[in-house]
Amino acid sequence: MLRGNFFELASVNDSAGKLTAVIHFDKTHEIFQGHFPGQPVVPGVCMIQMVKEILVQVVGNATRLEVADLVKFLTVIDPRETSTVYIELIYSNLENDRVKISATLFNEEIIYFKMRGTFLVSRATAAGKLT
């Protein structure tokens, strides 16, 4: 939903339950016209959605956030000043099609966002429908 127009992933490294990547924001995206006019800020809900979309890439199926143990928005991201951030996504499989994650958006010494939670991973059928 957001990937490909609101943000792009670059330099993705995924190994042993840890994904790191560079995120580039489109600072001209229409979301910033309303959030907020004259003072654009990356919305918190977009940060959560970005984690979800990146996790979908990792697991290969749709996901749904089931439990958010921790969601902290520590520093605002003004895309005019900071159009590139980094993500670290640590994930592990649990029973019953669940994945536990810990995600951080950061840039050098600044941490913008932290999240811990559990996602339910949908099982896809051969026809591409979710079960």
Image: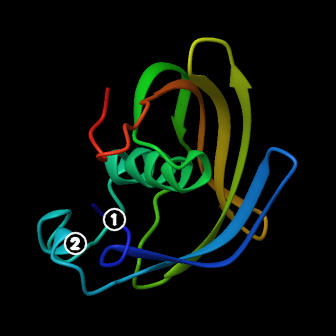
- In this view, the residue in front, 62 or 82, is 62
Residue 48 at x, y = what percent? Answer: 43, 44
For the N terminus, which image quadrant? bottom left
Residue 82 shows in this picture: no
Residue type (three-letter) at the residue carrying disc 2: Phe
Asked if residue 17 is positioned above or below residue 77 in the image, the reply reads above
Q: Quadrant of residue 6?
A: bottom left
Question: Does 120 sit left or right of 20 as displayed?
Answer: left
At horizontal 87% and vertical 48% (from top left) the residue drawn is 16
Q: Quadrant of residue 36?
A: bottom left
State the residue lying farthest toward the right.
16
At horizontal 40% and vertical 38% (from top left) the residue drawn is 124
For the C terminus, which image quadrant? top left
Residue type (three-letter) at the residue carrying disc 1: Val
Residue behind mark 1: 41
Crowding at label 1, few (<14), some or many (≥20) Cα neighbours within 10 Å? some
- In this view, the residue in front, 97 or 54, is 97
Q: Quadrant of residue 103?
A: top right
Residue behind mark 2: 32
Secondary structure at numbered mark 1 = loop
At horizontal 46% and vertical 44% (from top left) the residue drawn is 61
Crowding at label 2, few (<14), some or many (≥20) Cα neighbours within 10 Å? many
- Mark 1 and mark 2 residues within 8 Å of each other at the beta carbon: yes
Asked if residue 91 is positioned above or below residue 100 in the image, the reply reads below
Query: Which numbered disc, 1 or 2, marks the residue that appears first in the sequence?
Result: 2
Residue 40 at x, y = what percent? Answer: 28, 71
